[in-house]
Image (cartoon, rainbow, N blue to C red):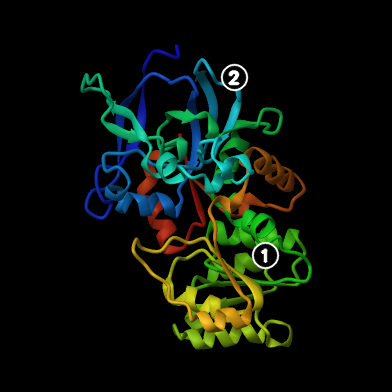
Amino acid sequence: MANSTAVTRAIVTRGPAKSTPWKVENISLRPLAKTELLVRVVATGICHTDLLISEVGHLFGGYPRILGHEGAGYVEDIGAGVTVAKRGDPVILSFASCGACGLCSSEHPAHCTRFSELNFVGSMDFSVSSSGQQEPSIRGSFFGQSSFSNITVAAESSIVNVSGLVHSSDELILFAPLGCSVQTGSGSITNVANAGPRDAIAVMGLGGVGLSVIMAAKIRGCKVIIGIDLVESRTRLAQELGATHVINTTATGGDMQKLIQRVFDQTDGRLGTTITIDTTGVLPLIEAGIAFTASRGQYIQIGSPAPGTELNVPLASLIVSGKSITGTIEGDTVSREYIPQMIQWYREGKLPLEKLVKKFKVEDFQLALEEMADGLTVKPVLVW
């Protein structure tokens, strides 16, 4: 079985999405390599990174390609060297790492020296099922998984075996976003910032990542939790999930100085936030976030701006203030340890994923994209 091919359906990206819409196609998969698994995906979340790479895929190996990196499903087959799972095991798919570099060896696989190669560029895994091609022509292995395919080739390093932790396929569907957006947001609080009760945190952008920041900050008992967004329904949800304050940026009219002042007004002594996290990638918000971060506070960048975006930081004020500016990806987590922790939080009622997730049939992916763009849906999950 590991040396045979499989035929399935997938959402294929054949060019920048603005000019070349995604399309569901029948595709074939190449045989498995030694450390790969064949996974039947039951669901996958849509993340803004899928949209970003869909537009700039020419920078990361080109088109056509299959995206998707918040998958969950069941193992159909395994390569000869796979030890992490067996056939039939439920798995959550996360990101790929080499496992051999200094960062992987020191338990920082999200900053693996080969991260871009293994997660953004990927490899040729698929071909059009009716073409009769012997060599794959469609790029896969996006985040080691390309879970916009109903059956996919997954790297062993991206697999989190959740046997004994997940009770049904319905739970697997709900847990699909744990592999990226939820661990990215919550991990930025627990791992990167190591937040605690004395912290005043602000998060800009209240999508799946930002709301996961809010939930994790509540878990850590942060004394001030400020959610910032321009969509009223999301600021309301942030309050429901644990935000002590919210700021709707439409009320500030896009005036960043007003936003900065509002944040200062909501912190003790009007000193600013000890932890600021941006999930938007919007440069004026990033600059404002650095400005309202308190002296010796942490500013953490998650959101990806357009390629080539540069940030100008006055170095003198940075030195005097003692602020730190940090970038992070995947919450600097070790997924095989962190995903079980998130499932435990869910069981304890501390991570109410059902308030973020809305399910869509795969064929309705365009509606999911529209609701995501309009702010009507926080975390769309495509169900096969």
2 vs 1, front mark: 2
Name the foreground residue: 102 vs 353.
102
Q: Relative to 15, is 316 on the left or the right?
A: right
Element marked by disc 2? loop
Three-letter residue code for mark 2: Lys
Name the foreground residue: 351 vs 367.
351
Question: Residue 1 sits in which quadrant?
Answer: top left
Name the foreground residue: 246 vs 280.
280
Could you say where residue 337 lies in the image, as x and y percent from the top left?
Answer: 68, 40
Q: Which residue is mark 1?
A: 240
Q: In this rendering, is residue 312 above or below 137?
A: below
Give the Cα separation between the discs numbered 2 and 1.
40 Å
Q: In this rendering, is residue 366 above or below 129?
A: below
N-terminal-most mark, 2 or 1: 2
Element marked by disc 1? helix
Q: Which mark is residue 86?
A: 2
Residue appearing at x 48%, y 75% in the figure: 285
Q: Residues within 10 Å of mark 2 (few under 14, many from 20)?
A: some
Residue appearing at x 39%, y 53% in the figure: 369
Q: In this rendering, is residue 135 above or below 226?
A: above
Work out whether residue 228 can be spotted. yes
Could you say where residue 158 lies in the image, as x and y percent from the top left?
Answer: 53, 35
Residue appearing at x 68%, y 84% in the figure: 271
Could you say where residue 175 lies in the image, as x and y percent from the top left?
Answer: 60, 42
Name the foreground residue: 108 vs 216.
108
Could you say where residue 135 lies in the image, as x and y percent from the top left?
Answer: 26, 23
